[in-house]
Amino acid sequence: MIHDDRTRQCAQENPRASGEDHGEWLREAEAMAAIEKADALMAVHEVTEDELNLTKQEKAILRREPPETKDPHLIKYRLIYAVSRFCGCRAWRETGSKAVTFCGLPSDAQLATWMLDTLTAFVQNELVNHLIEVGPSRGERRQVIRDFVIGCTDRISERLNKLRAQRELAAVPTSNAKALVVVKDAAIQAKLDELGIHLCSGSGLCGASDSPSYGAGSAAGNRASFGRPVSGKNATLRLTR
């Protein structure tokens, strides 16, 4: 178990860190601290020539959701851009379909799929809790759901983008590290060219009003946990809620 100053501070500041919720919150805070430390170690890891050569031999793959996949509240749609960039992939949905496709190196595409599913389940669970707590009328329900989902997915996306930017700034700026990014991008583009896939920017989504439900969603987004599943090289903790 990890007990550092950040963990103790989080446990003291968060109101959930009292009574019967103390153990649950402390475990979550410790897990998040462990992920941050693991990510920091990965960021300063210098890419070796052997690792670069192994990556050059890999080919990008597609990981598709089943065609019948549903996304009634557009949770996945609002998360795919941040998740795909965080994992070093490209992602899209075909016209008329809710199913998401990721294109990337096998380990990156696998991580992106897992992360999108895990975060979507988190948002759905938090939405249910919010609806039980607020108890909106039939006429208010649609707007409450929309505002909460936008608030939650906006905040999760902001956190993912910030983590990605921090990781890039902290990375060891070697020629191999720069080449690794080029190799990954080239592998993805080669796969897209092979399949004749041409991606274009999607239409923008409207934001939410400055409502209590948006604020509640944003607060929930602060509690989301994300990390690599426990498998493979340089993997970190796999967290679920």
Image (tube, grey):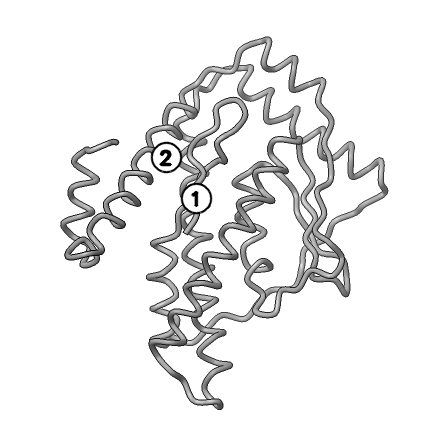
Name the residue beneath numbered marker 2: 35
Give the percent coordinates (x, y) of residue 1: 25, 31
The correct choice, above or below, for 171 with respect to 151 in the image is: above
Left or right, 68 with reference to 175:
right
Q: Name the residue rendered at 46%, 60% in the picture.
A: 123
- Per the image, the residue denoted by label 1 is 226
Question: Circle 2 sits in a helix, a strand or a loop, which is it?
Answer: helix
Q: Nearer the viewer, residue 25 or 234?
A: 25
Which residue corresponds to the image point at 56% horizontal and 15% vertical from the top-left? 176
Residue at the (66%, 31%) spot, across then down: 106
Q: Residues within 10 Å of mark 1 (few under 14, many from 20)?
A: many
Residue type indicated by callout 1: Phe
Camera-nearest residue between 228 and 207: 228
Amino acid carrying label 2: it is: Ile
Neighbour tally class for label 2: few under 14, some 14-19, many 20 plus, Cα within 10 Å: many
- Sooner in the amino-acid sequence: mark 2 or mark 1: 2
Q: Secondary structure at mark 1?
A: loop
